[in-house]
Image (tube, helix red, strand yellow):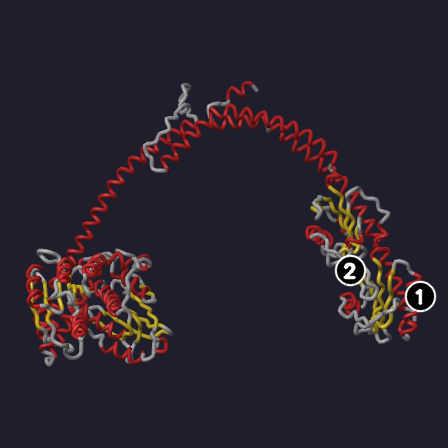
Amino acid sequence: MSKLLSRLRLNSLRSRLMLLVLLAITPIAVVTVLGGLREREAAIRASEDNLKRLTALAAANEAQSIDRARQILVDLVGVPDLMGDTAGCNALLADFLDRNEGFVNFGLIQPDGEVSCSAVPMLHPVNLGDRSHFKRAVAERRFIASDYVFGRVIRKHTINLTYPVIDRNGQVAAVVFAAMDLASLDTFVNDISMPPGSILETADASGNLISRRPDPERWFGKRISPALLAALRSQSGAPGAQNAQHGRAVVVMGEDGVERLHAFARVGAPTLTEYTVTIGVPTATITQVARDAQLMSLLGLGATTLLALLAAWLAGDKLIVRRVRNLTSVARRIAAGDLQARTGNHVGSRTGNGGAREEIGQLAVALDEMAENLQTKETARSLAERELRAADQRKDEFLAMLAHELRNPLAPISTGAHLLKLLHSDNAQITQTCAIIARQVEHMTSLVDDLLDVSRVTRGLVSLSTQVLDLRNVVGDAAEQIRPLITARRHKVVLDLPNGAVPVRGDHKRLVQVVANLLGNATKYTPEGGHITLRLKEDGRDWLLEVSDDGIGMEPGLVTRVFDLFTQAERTPDRSQGGLGLGLALAKSLVELHGGSVSAASAGLGRGSTFTVRLPRHTPDSAAPGSAQAFAAAVAGQSGLVAGAVPAASALRILVVDDNLDAAHTLNLFLSAAGHEVEIAYCAADAIEIAKVFAPQVCLLDIGLPDIDGNELARRLRRLPQTSNALLIAATGYGRTQDRDAASQAGFDHYMVKPVNTVQLNDLLAQAAA
């Protein structure tokens, strides 16, 4: 033993704890527990056999009583006067009742359930047709012992024993019954001697008590406890089981809180009764001797354990607890963000005999190293976060400025196109050319908006401007957008569209963007001279739009992720038009915002691809009244052209303020052609001076002016008596939400992003004139 102890390393936490537990608890605990279990099991096994014999004896006594009653009924059925007149039958049954103790009534039940005669006079007619034992006696044509019954005639706790009367034709002519008093049944087991605290119960098939010791009268007809019922059925209900004494005794907790060992026995054969007898003996009585011996052993074990715990506490407080508390405190400080916290608790981390490490010392070293590494990484992360915020801020500022600078040249182009169309509305070619320019400017504007909102689009935060529209017009506008690319690559494009309208509810601009992205994707990855087919068809409650090509196709791995951001096929020199891999991801997000879905398929590399968009059909019945007319009106205006000239409005005095000369002059020409009186200013100072003299009714102000911005100019115009009630409209290249909020706070009535929508502008001017 000394050699073994000398080999144990006492410098590790595990070895100390294991040594304390093994020395103080293990030997005595194992001996005590095993010895106590063996003694208890031996006592239970010895008692189990005696208990099963006692239960079998009680069941045999009750079976003898029931069998005697069965024989009485058999004899009664053989008496001819039983089926005679009622008076004779009553006298016969009364004679049987006088000559047989333990019974409280005899009777005869007709097939309809009516009791035709009874040993006890009936005060009123009685029908027993609802009794299950009567029904079984008729159906099974044999002796049946009923469940617990409270007699309707005699008003006592009984069991009814029934036997069918068979006529010469083999039919059941009646059923004779004997009502046995449960108090008499219980007398057959009174002479059975049981230990104190034991119970003897006889239950029917439903679990109702028909016999019990002690206090039988108080328990007649009550249910046995659920735990005991479950044990009873598992022991006596096994298929083919004749007697429960062949099963194991089980321990059941009684409703009085006493744990008892129960044995079960069937009362007679299954053809005689369905009763079960159980006797339960308190386990405390059975295991009393073994328990006393075990208690003494446990007292010794408790004393030993207490000494071991005391030793562990005294030694562990200094060696373990205090050091662990220090480590816990440091860990919490680190978790709270104090990365300069250190344990300083490296005692025992190394020893002088070979450098073996002790666990708590190792943990202290590791915790300090972790804190130091976290502090270094946190410093680097904070620096990177600051740089990232600064780069993100510069990116936002650059995008806002880029959008502003791109919108400024688009504004005069758009206004000039609408002006040419207005002045040459009788020239079809000029009108068509102006419409194309207007649509392309609008598309360019949408691309600028997407440049600012790309993160918002990919996160599904785009707000849609929905209306009823014809999907064929969406396809036409999308095809027109990519026509130059198709022409340059000499693709053969087939549009297979339905003859009738294709109504959907959606955002025209966004759906055009979806179809254009799909067509553009097909042109990029289809060799020159290839074929592209766009097919639009009905599929149940949806419209299916399929874009197929005979291009390079996709391998299976790419098909599953083609709609992910920045996903592209391998770029080759003949596909120099490939983008950044955003088009299909944006298309998928926009289609899902419309309540639809998009999918891709390919037979493999070199075998083309097919992209399918599924959109829900719009039915006029689901819209408001007049939806058919609204749909027709919406379809009529989806080509991007405004039929006829701009509606004329009453002449207004309008002040245009813009530092972009082209934008200001083209807007001047457009407004003048509409009959308005226009003055132009290129800076805020000139605008204020002109406003004092001109007293404009409407002011169109750019935000980015050279001297003061348009928001400050709006505030000053509101303070002038000549323009305090004027209609202030912001016309600017800045389109962010914060820009709109700042303009609203400055006093602007409306906010328009360049290039200005001239139709919307005319509507605002018409409202101002009214």
Tell me the distance, in whole angstroms, between the alpha carbons under discs 2 and 1.
25 Å
Q: Secondary structure at mark 1?
A: helix
Residue occupying the point 37% across, 73% down: 541
Residue that numbered label 2 is attached to: 148
Residue 214 percent coordinates (x, y) = 80, 48
How busy is the neighbourhood of tag 1: few (under 14 within 10 Å), some, or many (20 plus)? Answer: few
Residue 586 figure quarter: bottom left
Q: Secondary structure at mark 2?
A: strand
Residue 599 figure quarter: bottom left
Using the image, tell me which numbered label, if any, was put on residue 349: none
User: Looking at numbered disc 2 in the image, what kind of residue is underneath it?
Assistant: Tyr
Residue occupying the point 34% across, 37% down: 337
Residue that numbered label 1 is attached to: 95
Q: Quick check: 520 above or below 676?
A: above
Residue closer to the observer: 767 or 83: 767
Residue occupying the point 82% across, 50% down: 58
Residue closer to the observer: 108 or 156: 156
Q: Quick check: 356 above or below 230?
A: above
Residue occupying the point 79% across, 51% down: 212
Residue 767 percent coordinates (x, y) = 19, 73
Left or right relative to 63: residue 357: left
Q: Quadrant of the N terminus?
A: top right
User: Looking at numbered disc 1 in the image, what kind of residue is underneath it?
Assistant: Asp
Residue closer to the observer: 362 or 296: 296
Residue 495 percent coordinates (x, y) = 25, 74
How busy is the neighbourhood of tag 2: few (under 14 within 10 Å), some, or many (20 plus)? Answer: many
